[in-house]
Image (spheres, helix red, strand yellow):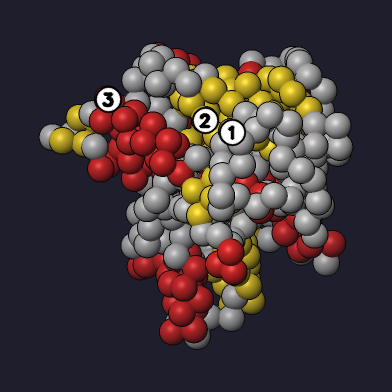
């Protein structure tokens, strides 16, 4: 539905800009236009002006958090002889934002999220936010109008967390959460960046538990942010056996002592036989497989590691959903495949509760945050 609103007072109207305000952001789409207009996530370019329509909210940006798949692609692109060229990576991020009016990696299509302070609220906004609230946006940067004003001068390009100054716009139908007072804001940002994963895992495992089944759950990328939270959520929801899959010995050494998984196995999630053999040796095949890795090529291995009639949750922007669907068909695998879309009602509160209640999860996140800060 498009709600008719005039352009904000004093603002200049580009010739191709929609003159009505839409709760899903159609009025901010600059390209394409006319009959070809798309929603903001699929748009080539957004209007990131600071002036607000009546149902919008403006955020003063503090930190961007690039999603893992996007940052990995950019880092690999700008790596020579094993060394990441942080300046070149920073310049590319600035160019993307300036060109597209949002942070959307043109290769992965993904973005990330941000934290900041509310500095203006339209009179018809229904987001429940007030000026001065410190918030994390729970919608992707790939659809959020964004303008950077400091040239990302405080960022060396070597981490996913990006100190930044500028502004971002939330539409009438956006999502944001106030940052809790008892946690470091950057720790909250790390958790909220992946909060959809544990919420969806809890829901799926809970469906099994409701049938008096304690499922075997395998998490690929188990030592990462979404992976560790997914293990904790699966345990709390009633999983019977938890298998954590990691790619390198250092991650196994990190994860094993936490007790988040009943067994931690070393396997390349892109290797069909390697992954399925490792999961089977650890007590699989899995009833529920959660894909949290940020590299492509894990679709068919995940299918082979999952029992007939089982469930696979793809929670990675590196996933090819065509490869997943056609791969399952080719393997004659009767599995339910779920796309983790990043939103489940109450997902931020659930993830933060896991951080507070599961010491091992908090220790992993605090260790990751310390490592992020050491690069600055």
Give the crowd class for mark 1: few <14, some 14-19, many >=20 residues within 10 Å: some
Identify the secondary structure beneath mark 1: loop
Numbered mark located on residue 147 in the image = 2
Numbered mark located on residue 87 in the image = 3
Contact? badges 1 and 2 (CB < 8 Å): yes
Closest to the observer, 364 or 186: 186
- Whichever of callouts 1 and 3 sits on the residue coming sooner in the sequence is 1
Going by the image, does 12 lie left or right of 244? right
Identify the secondary structure beneath mark 3: helix
Q: Residue at x 40, y 21 (%)?
A: 151
Q: Residue at x 47, y 53 (%)?
A: 44
Q: Quote the CA–CA distance across marks 1 and 3.
A: 26 Å
Give the position of the C terminus as an image quadrant: top left
Give the crowd class for mark 3: few <14, some 14-19, many >=20 residues within 10 Å: some
Going by the image, does 94 lie left or right of 338? left
Q: Can residue 139 be spotted in the picture? A: yes
Q: Nearer the viewer, mark 1 or mark 3?
A: 1
In which image quadrant can residue 123 be found? top right
Q: Residue at x 49, y 84 (%)?
A: 329
Above or below, 34 against 76 in this view is below
Numbered mark located on residue 94 in the image = none
Give the position of the N terminus as an image quadrant: bottom right
Above or below, 287 against 106 in this view is below
Q: Residue at x 46, y 79 (%)?
A: 326
Identify the secondary structure beneath mark 2: strand
Closest to the observer, 17 or 81: 17
Q: Circle 1 sits on which residue? A: 49
Q: Position of residue 332 (x, y in %)?
A: 50, 85
- Whichever of callouts 3 and 2 sits on the residue coming sooner in the sequence is 3
Q: Position of residue 356 (x, y in %)?
A: 72, 25
Above or below, 31 against 13 in this view is below
């Amino acid at each position: 539905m498009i709600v008719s609103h005039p352009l904000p007072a004093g603002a200049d109207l580009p010739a191709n800009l929609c003159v009505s305000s839409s709760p899903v952001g159609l009025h901010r789409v600059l390209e394409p236009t006319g009959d070809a207009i798309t929603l903001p996530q699929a748009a080539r370019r957004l209007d990131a002006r600071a002036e607000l329509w009546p149902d919008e909210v403006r955020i003063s940006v503090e930190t961007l958090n690039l999603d893992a798949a996007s940052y990995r692609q950019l880092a690999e692109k700008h790596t020579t002889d094993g060394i990441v060229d942080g300046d070149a990576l920073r310049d590319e991020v600035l160019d993307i934002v300036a060109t597209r009016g949002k942070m959307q990696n043109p290769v992965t299509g993904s973005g990330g999220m941000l934290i900041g302070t509310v500095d203006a609220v339209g009179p018809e906004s229904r987001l429940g936010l007030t000026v001065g609230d410190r918030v994390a946006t729970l919608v992707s940067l790939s659809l959020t109008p964004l303008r950077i004003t400091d040239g990302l001068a405080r960022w060396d390009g070597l981490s996913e967390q990006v100190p930044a100054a500028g502004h971002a716009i939330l539409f009438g139908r956006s999502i944001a959460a106030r940052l809790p007072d008892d946690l470091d804001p950057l720790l909250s940002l790390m958790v909220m960046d992946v909060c959809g994963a544990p919420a969806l895992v809890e829901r799926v495992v809970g469906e099994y538990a409701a049938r008096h089944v304690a499922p075997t759950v395998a998490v690929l990328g188990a030592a990462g942010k979404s992976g560790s939270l997914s293990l904790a959520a699966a345990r709390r929801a009633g999983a019977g056996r938890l298998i954590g899959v990691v790619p390198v010995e250092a991650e196994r050494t990190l994860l094993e002592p936490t007790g988040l998984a009943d067994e931690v196995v070393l396997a390349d999630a892109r290797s069909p036989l390697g992954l399925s053999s490792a999961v089977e040796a650890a007590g699989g095949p899995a009833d529920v497989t959660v894909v949290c890795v940020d590299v492509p090529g894990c679709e068919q291995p995940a299918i082979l590691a999952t029992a007939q009639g089982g469930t696979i949750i793809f929670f990675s922007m590196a996933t090819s959903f065509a490869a997943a669907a056609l791969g399952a068909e080719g393997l004659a695998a009767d599995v339910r495949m779920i796309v983790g879309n990043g939103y489940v009602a109450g997902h931020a509160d659930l993830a933060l509760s896991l951080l507070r209640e599961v010491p091992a999860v908090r220790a992993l996140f605090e260790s990751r945050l310390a490592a992020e800060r050491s690069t600055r």
